Amino acid sequence: MVPFGYKATAFMFYSLVAFIAASKDDKEKVSKVQETDRLLHERQLNLREVVFVIQSQRNSFHAQRAQRLRADLLLQAEALQESLPAILLLHALSENEGDWSILPLLPYLSSHFGKNSSWVMFLEEETNIKLGKLYSVLQKFERRKEWFLGKPLHDDESTIIHHYAFAENPSAFKYPDFSAGWALSMPLVNRLSNKVQEQPLKSDFTIDLKHEVALYIWDEGKGPRLTAVPELCTLPEHSPQAHHCATTVNTHSPLCGEPVKRESIFVAVKTCKKFHTERVPVVKKTWEKQAAHLEYYSDHADPSIPTIDLGVPNTDRGHCGKTFAILKRYVSNAVPKTDWLLIVDDDTLISLPRLQALLSCYDPTEPVFLGERYGYGLGQGGYSYITGGGGMVFSREAVLRLLASGCKCYSNDAPDDMVLGMCFNSLRLPVTHSPLFHQARPEDYARDLLAHQTPISFHKHWNIDPIAVFHKWLIDDAHGSGTERLRKAPKEEL
Ligand SMILES: *[C@@H]1O[C@H](CO)[C@@H](O)[C@H](O)[C@H]1NC(C)=O
């Protein structure tokens, strides 16, 4: 009884205190609300405090999409008030190829906007934004503090694309889904900018930028973690659940007209003797029949597949010799003349119909080199490349320019994708990123990320049933969502 009586008395006492405190609080709250209203009003007159960075790309299709997003933002800003915010297109800011990895760009942002702005908001081309809503969301955060805002993703298992980070508890670390947009407050931009300038960025590879940026900011607890903002969304714009959202995304893959014809794509599959019975049958059972023109290249001619022996000895590590032999064969009379070349590994899983749809957005007379972009040494003037396993797509023009340049492998076993990246970099031709190509397996990517993608490829058979993965992720059957998505996708009007 005693403890109960004590607790009851204590409870009444604290309730009374709470009651008195509440009535005092309420008065404060009222004046706070008025104050907030006033600030809010003032702040809305100050749209220019937010600097927008569109994570744009040089390829003409992407540059136009980014310009369209900028035009839309300017229209919205005009409708809210006259003074317009700075909206930067990342690809046009400098000649530095590594800018897409964001960290090298921070000193620029800090020196130009560090004193006169409060936020940097990063957007992808496919991010839709409701500007008014976004401003009221940003106003909730004290702008003099360090903030890293976004829609969080997490890993369910530790994954190779994040170097198996946080193996003991993979879901604990949150990183932003770039499609939803993400923001840094200016005090954080300024501090990071100093850090970038004082200690050169040491990471060699840029693989999954959003994870790497979050790690760099968090800095083992010395910097802020990602703060989840529920209004930054990756729902489709017209979804009924998106009512509260300040950002939404286009979940369909882009379609800019009729998909290119099957006959416009030549497919090269790299294999070697030891995988003729293990991996080639998977290609045959899944996506081979989607191709009009396809050849298998090996170190051994096997008429039952058939494979073509390119006369390049197989190498365990890179396949540079083999890949350059494929490029030369592609422009020779030995194969049909096509607009596009796709080079994949024998353990790549790919949807050619979705690739045909995507390629409707690109001009084959331009030098296009497309796939999942990785970076090497970007902090110190390195280069970008299309990672081979997810599939490398070349326009004929890109192959012709590459071969004409005389750029070549430094050894047969050099990593082909990286050498190609170096070659394109020295030609000053951009590599074009599409997040729909994947260098790893579906389980290696955050579930919430894949939920708003129509993926084109995955790679590697390790610990999965590749045929099941193909059917689950890459097939558009008559009733499946994939084809429907493509059909319903509004066309890109450029
Ligand atoms: C801040 O300064 C930059 C130039 O350094 C300018 O382009 C931008 O418009 C300025 N922003 C504001 C809000 O004054």
Image: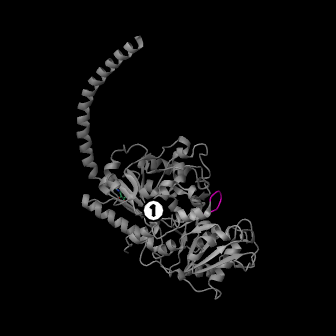
Give the SS element for disc 1.
loop
Tell which residue pokes out farthest to the top in this image.
2
Q: Quadrant of ligand 1?
A: bottom left
Residue reaching furthest front? 479
- Dominant secondary-structure state across the stretch colored magenta: loop
Q: Which quadrant, please, contains the N terminus?
A: top left
| Residue 188 in the image, given as x and y percentages of width and height | 45, 47
Query: What residue is pinned by disc 1?
Result: 55
Look at the image and tell me in which quarter the C terminus lies. Answer: bottom left
**What crowding class fits label 1: few (fewer than 14 Cα within 10 Å), some (14-19), or many (20 or more)?**
many
Residue range in magenta is 459-464
Q: Residue at x 75, y 71 (%)?
A: 273
> Residue placed at 60% from the left, 86% from the top?
336
Q: Is residue 30 left or right of residue 335?
A: left
Q: Amino acid at mark 1?
A: Gln
Image position of 418 with respect to 17: above or below: below
Task: Pick whichever, 487 or 45, lies toward us.
Answer: 487
> What is the quadrant of residue 374 in the picture?
bottom right
Choose between 378 and 17: the one closer to the eye. Answer: 17
- Asked if residue 193 lies in the magenta stretch, the reply is no
In this rendering, the answer to whether 34 lies above or below 95 is above
Q: Is residue 26 left or right of residue 199?
A: left
